[in-house]
């Protein structure tokens, strides 16, 4: 049986897992969770994922619910000959990949959440100047991590690009990246957006998020 991914299209972490699955040729059974109706907080979902977050992966009798850990699990079990490229075993390269993953979960994605959730479930009608400054600060960190490389952790695509890239693309409707201030990041985003799996999965998902957040902002302005 295919692993089951509980997701919503607007979730960058869920999109990241789907992109990885497509790259390694893994079929997932996709089950949509009604985020707006707090389906991720339902008793049934909490039993699977005590954090009450999206995405959640169920592979037989095994359940895991943090997207970065999920990506590593899927690579270890199903990645085959693509595992080495996407999560290199070289000690230093793997450490840099992990650094970028921890940056994404500990800093970058939080700066997306603090804009989105108050809009959708509160009365926020747009990002504050402080939130914009915080996002710019995070863009600066991505710019520094890229350095002279085409990709964020190595000279080729890794799971760090998938996870951080998903957050970056989803961030654009909230506070657009300035290509003059962050030229390496802008070039990297353009490169990712040309990847077939990003085009198929992430760009439509980011458009859903843009629509939901903009609709919430407009409603909250009235």
Image (cartoon, rainbow, N blue to C red):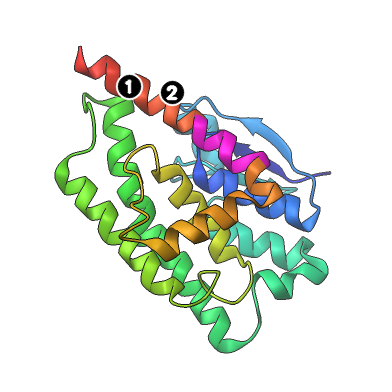
Which x, y percent locates residue 3?
74, 46
Identify the residue under disc 1: 216
Circle 1 residues within 10 Å: few <14, some 14–19, many ≥20: many
Q: Which mark is residue 34?
A: none
User: Which of the two residues, 217 or 52, is positioned nearer the viewer here?
Assistant: 217
Q: Label the magenta part by its dominant secondary structure.
A: helix
Helix, strand or loop under label 2: loop
Outermost residue, top side: 222
CA gap, disc 2 and disc 1:
11 Å
Q: Is residue 193 above or below residue 155?
A: above
Which x, y percent locates residue 125?
22, 26
What residue is drawn where x is 43% and y is 45%?
A: 51
For the record, the magenta segment spans: 200-207
Question: Which tag, 2 or 1, sits closer to the chain's start?
Answer: 2
Q: Which mark is residue 36?
A: 2
Left or right for 24, reference 169 = right
- Quadrant in the picture for the C terminus: top left
User: Which of the two residues, 61 or 110, is positioned nearer the viewer here?
Assistant: 110
Outermost residue, left side: 129
Helix, strand or loop under label 1: helix
User: Which of the two residues, 220 or 151, is positioned nearer the viewer here?
Assistant: 151
Q: Is residue 205 magenta?
A: yes
Q: Quadrant of residue 20?
A: bottom right
What residue is drawn where x is 44% and y is 51%?
A: 168
Which x, y percent locates residue 87?
64, 72
């Amino acid at each position: 049986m295919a692993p089951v991914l509980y997701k919503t299209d607007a979730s960058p972490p869920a999109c990241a897992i789907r992109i990885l699955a497509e790259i390694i040729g893994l079929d997932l059974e996709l089950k949509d969770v009604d985020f707006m109706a707090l389906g991720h907080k339902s008793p049934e979902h909490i039993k699977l994922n005590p954090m009450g977050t999206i995405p959640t992966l169920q592979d037989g009798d095994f359940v895991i619910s943090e997207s970065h850990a999920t990506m590593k699990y899927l690579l270890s079990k199903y990645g085959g000959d693509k595992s080495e490229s996407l999560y290199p075993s070289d000690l230093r390269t793997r450490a840099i990949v992990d650094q970028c993953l921890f940056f994404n979960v500990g800093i970058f994605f939080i700066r997306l959440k603090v804009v989105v959730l108050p809009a959708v479930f509160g009365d926020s009608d747009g990002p504050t100047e402080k939130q914009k400054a915080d996002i710019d600060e995070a863009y600066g960190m991505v710019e520094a991590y890229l350095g002279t490389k085409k990709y964020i952790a190595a000279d080729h695509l890794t799971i760090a690009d998938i996870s951080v890239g998903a957050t970056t693309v989803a961030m654009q409707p909230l506070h657009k990246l300035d290509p003059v201030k962050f030229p390496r990041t802008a070039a990297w985003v353009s490169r990712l957006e040309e990847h077939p799996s990003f085009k198929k999965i992430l760009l439509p998902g980011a458009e859903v998020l843009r629509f939901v957040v903009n609709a919430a902002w407009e409603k909250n302005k009235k």
